[in-house]
Image (cartoon, rainbow, N blue to C red):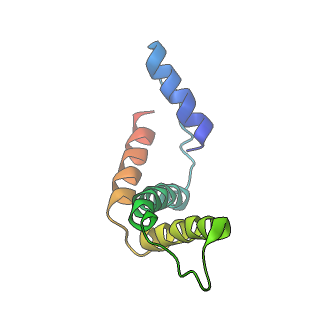
Amino acid sequence: MEPSALLNAQASLNTGRALPTINKTASLQKIKETAEDFEAVFISQMLKPMFEGIKSDTMFGGGQAEDMWRSQMMDEYGKTIAKSGGIGIAKAVMGEMLKLQEIN
């Protein structure tokens, strides 16, 4: 589901209107990818505090550039963990997305 569709659904819930219809032709593969992407972001956000206290080697590292690369490394760790089975969030998110399709 696209982010704009999620925002519209949330706005509908807040105002008491009926939920918008969800495109039933969305492929199962696309739903799986979206759920894995969500899990990857979640995992990377959980990993970032683990690496905040680690100081870099002063001889070859440090500075703002290392902070930027470390952030990207955490994002890639999250993607890798999610693609290799993750922690179960993608499966739950995918199930909820499929339930939403069954409602309409």
Residue 51 placement, left or right of 26: left
Q: Quadrant of residue 13?
A: top left
Q: Quadrant of residue 49?
A: bottom left
Residue 51 placement, left or right of 87: right
Residue 91 in view, yes or no: yes
Instruction: Give percent across and percent down for residue 87.
Output: 32, 65
Q: Quadrant of residue 81?
A: bottom left
Q: Nearer the viewer, residue 63 or 46?
A: 63
34 lies above or below 82: above
Residue 102 placement, left or right of 88: right
Q: Nearer the viewer, residue 60 or 31?
A: 60
Q: Quadrant of the N terminus?
A: top right
Instruction: Give percent across and percent down for residue 98.
Output: 41, 47
Q: Residue furthest right?
A: 65
Residue 17 in view, yes or no: no
Q: Residue furthest front?
A: 58
| Residue at (55, 31) in percent of width and height | 7
Instruction: Give percent across and percent down for residue 25.
Output: 57, 48
Q: Residue furthest bottom?
A: 59
Q: Nearer the viewer, residue 81 or 52?
A: 52
75 lies above or below 13: below
Instruction: Give percent across and percent down for residue 50.
Output: 38, 65
Q: Quadrant of the C terminus?
A: top left
Q: Nearer the viewer, residue 38 or 48?
A: 48
| Residue at (53, 37) in percent of width and height | 22
Total numbered labels placed on residues in the image = 0
| Residue at (42, 66) in percent of width and height | 53
| Residue at (56, 28) in percent of width and height | 8
